[in-house]
Amino acid sequence: DAGVIQSPRHEVTEMGQEVTLRCKPISGHNSLFWYRQTMMRGLELLIYFNNNVPIDDSGMPEDRFSAKMPNASFSTLKIQPSEPRDSAVYFCASRPTGSNQPQHFGDGTRLSIL
Amino acid sequence: GQQVMQIPQYQHVQEGEDFTTYCNSSTTLSNIQWYKQRPGGHPVFLIQLVKSGEVKKQKRLTFQFGEAKKNSSLHITATQTTDVGTYFCAGRNNNNDMRFGAGTRLTVKP
């Protein structure tokens, strides 16, 4: 079975540029999560969607970050403009129906902002 | 808001020694999940605990959920080099919010 697919795996760009991270959840999963992981702050929940609807975006750091889920099989996390402090590994995870189900993580996108 | 505290932040052990990581929540949890992240990898689900006082085992790993459903522990008996990684707990409160602990990074010296 295909797992959660994230792209790109690595992204290096200059500050000020727009960055778009992509995620394809596991088919049939109705919840999707975006996380950011850094050494200093650990694993932080940025936003999650249920049935394509954003439920909790309280973890989104600031207005430079935005996330969309136009359909059940695709989500994007956008940073505009990017800053060096945005450098981190960004994970997408999906979960089947039912809040007791485990989350399945993608391989992550390692983002470096120069 | 709900906070999940996890200790220790780091643990370095000699191969064969035991290892324990602890999670504490500021609120009562409906369930708690444990994940393992290998170096350079992504978190992978290990187990879920739901009942008060529940204990589950996976080979050398023992997971416990406290009687008050506010704390949990993961204990590894006789660590091996394959146990290296970061172990995360993730607690779900009664409002269905789930939060990850900061993780415990385990290193094992052969």
Image (cartoon, coloured by chain):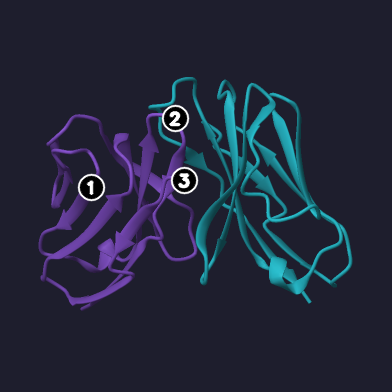
Residue B64 in sight from this viewpoint: yes
Residue placed under numbered mark 2 in the picture: B96
Residue placed under numbered mark 1 in the picture: B71
Residue A26 in sight from this viewpoint: no
Q: What is the three-letter code of the residue carrying label 2?
A: Asn
Nearer to us in this view, B99 or B82: B99
Q: Residue at x 42, y 50 (%)?
A: B100
Residue A52, given in percent of the width and then of the height, sits at 69, 25
Q: CA distance from mark 3 to mark 1?
A: 17 Å
- The circle drawn on residue B1 is 3
SS under mark 1:
strand
The color chain A is rendered in: cyan
CA neighbours of label 3 inside 10 A, class few (<14), some (14 to 19), many (20+): few
Q: What is the three-letter code of the residue carrying label 1?
A: Asn
Chain letter for the residue marked with disc 3 in the picture: B
Residue A87, given in percent of the width and then of the height, sits at 68, 68
Q: What is the three-letter code of the residue carrying label 3?
A: Gly
Chain letter for the residue marked with disc 2 in the picture: B
**Above or below: residue A59 compared with residue B96:** below
The color chain B is rendered in: purple
Q: Is residue A12 left or right of residue A106?
A: right
Discs 2 and 1 carry the same chain letter? yes
SS under mark 3:
loop
Q: Nearer the viewer, mark 3 or mark 1?
A: 3
Nearer to us in this view, B95 or B89: B95
**Above or below: residue B19 compared with residue A61:** below
Q: Earlier in the sequence, mark 3 or mark 1?
A: 3
Residue B81, given in percent of the width and then of the height, sits at 25, 69
SS under mark 2:
loop
